[in-house]
Structure formats: structure tokens, C-alpha cells
Image: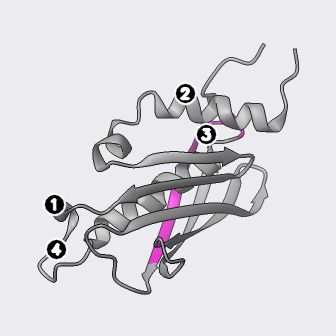
Amino acid sequence: MTISDQQRAEKSAEAMWATDDASKWFGMSLDAVGPGTATMSLTVIDAQTNGHNICHGGVIFALADSAFAFACNSYNKVTVAQSNSITYVAPARTGDRLTAMAVEIARSGRSGTWDVTVTNQDGATIALFRGLARTISGTLFEEE
């Protein structure tokens, strides 16, 4: 039985989410996934702020990186990060709802590039993330 690209992305995300304790620990939710795309979010809590009383950059990075991971694994091929970078544009504060939208920019053979934009509930850009990924051996679920 052949499955659609959307079904493949959803089943891949389901397999990843089942063991993604780190994202769950941070309080993230997986809001949407599609071929080469993923959207995740979290609400900033006091424990995620730094000495400046703003959201710790590592939390924002983790959210962007998680969305990147779900997007680049959406083809049911085990894919890992090669490199990534993040630019922090504006601060996030306790109570802000942050959303990370990952979008595939280019993919050729086993390599690909994804951009992730992290915004708050008002639509303000908080961070811009770019990730490069490489497909390795294996799948996330067995296709019939």
C-alpha cells in the first residue's frame, strides 16, 4: 500500500515524538508537520528565563532545533544535523507563546537546508535559525 507524502510525514513525526523526551520536558508541542515542514511551540515559563529575566537563548535554540529535526525527518529517512546557526532578533519573556516554523529551502541527494523562524504570539520575530542536515541509513517506521 502506498502512502501519501503527508501521511509519511505524519507517521515519521509520530515515531519521533514517541521517544522525544527532551522536547516534551521543555514543554513543547508538535503543532503541524508536512513534507519538509514542521511547526512546534512552547510557552515560556519562569524557569526558562536567564539573568536578564528574558527567555534563555538555549530554550529558543532547542525549540528551533526540534522543529528543524521534525521537518528534515519528515520523509521517513533518518536525518541528522550537520550544522546550524541562530540569530536572536528580539527577546521573549515569561508567558510568551513561541512558535517555530521550519521550512525546507533545498534538498539534494542526502543533504538539505532548512530555515526556521521563531515568532511570539504577536507575530514578532524572535529568532532566525538555519540548519543543514544529512540523511544517514535507516527509517523511522516500516513502510508496507
Q: Magenta stretch mostly in which secondary structure?
A: strand
Question: Could you tell me if the residues under marks 1 and 2 are in contact, i.e. CB atoms within 8 Å?
Answer: no
- Circle 4: residue type: Asn
Q: Residue 77, image x and y in percent?
A: 67, 36
Residue on which the image places disc 3: 136
Residue placed most toward the observer, 34 or 41:
41
From the image, which quarter does the N terminus lie in? top right
N-terminal-most mark, 1 or 2: 2
The span from disc 1 to disc 4 (Cα, nearest Å) is 8 Å
- The numbered disc on residue 50 is 4
SS of the residue under disc 2:
helix
Q: Among all residues in the image, which is located at the extreme left?
A: 51
Circle 2 crowding by C-alpha within 10 Å: few under 14, some 14–19, many from 20: some
Inspect the magenta stretch and tell me whether residue 72 lies in it: no
- Circle 1: residue type: Ala
Residue drawn at 62 percent across, 42 percent down:
73
Magenta stretch bounds: 75-86
Inspect the magenta stretch and tell me whether residue 79 lies in it: yes
